[in-house]
Image: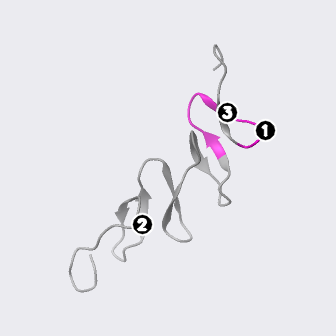
Amino acid sequence: MSSNGQCAQLPANCTSADTFGNCTSCDPGFQLDTSTSDCLELPPNCAVMDMQGNCTQCNTGFYIDQNADCTALPANCA
């Protein structure tokens, strides 16, 4: 809600915000940058990234390859 008591639109890709309009959680596929309160798009098949935008944890069924991308695990591999 804005200072004049009106409802304010959420920032882009944000699912909830604090009383100051700062994003506190993001849409699926996005990660909150706590220093800016912006929602940053995750790389493909990435679950968590660092502040430089590099994936540090892939979604289930993927691994971080030598290029720092999330690649599907080979068949019969868990």
Residue denoted by label 2? 23
Left or right of 51? Residue 6 is left
Residue appearing at x 63%, y 42% in the figure: 57
Q: Quadrant of the C terminus?
A: top right
Q: Quadrant of the N terminus?
A: bottom left
Left or right of 17? Residue 1 is left
62 in magenta: yes
Q: Nearer the viewer, mark 3 or mark 1?
A: 1
**12 or 55, which is in the foreground?**
12
Residue appearing at x 40%, y 63% in the figure: 12
Q: Label for residue 63?
A: 3
64 in magenta: yes
Distance of label 2 from label 1 (alpha carbons): 33 Å
Location of residue 39 in the rendering, given as x and y in whole percent from the top left corner? 48, 61
Q: Secondary structure at mark 2?
A: strand
- The quadrant holding residue 14 is bottom left
Distance of label 2 from label 3 (alpha carbons): 29 Å
Above or below 45: residue 28: below
What is the total number of numbered labels drawn onto the structure image? 3
Above or below 75: residue 36: below
Q: Are marks 2 and 3 in contact (CB under 8 Å)?
A: no
Location of residue 51 in the rendering, given as x and y in whole percent from the top left corner? 65, 60
Q: Residues within 10 Å of mark 2 (few under 14, many from 20)?
A: many
Q: Mark 3 belongs to which amino acid? A: Tyr
Q: Are marks 3 and 1 in contact (CB under 8 Å)?
A: no
Residue denoted by label 1? 66
**5 or 12, which is in the foreground?**
12
Q: Nearer the viewer, mark 2 or mark 1?
A: 1
Q: Which residues are magenta?
A: 56-68
Q: Mark 2 belongs to which amino acid? A: Cys
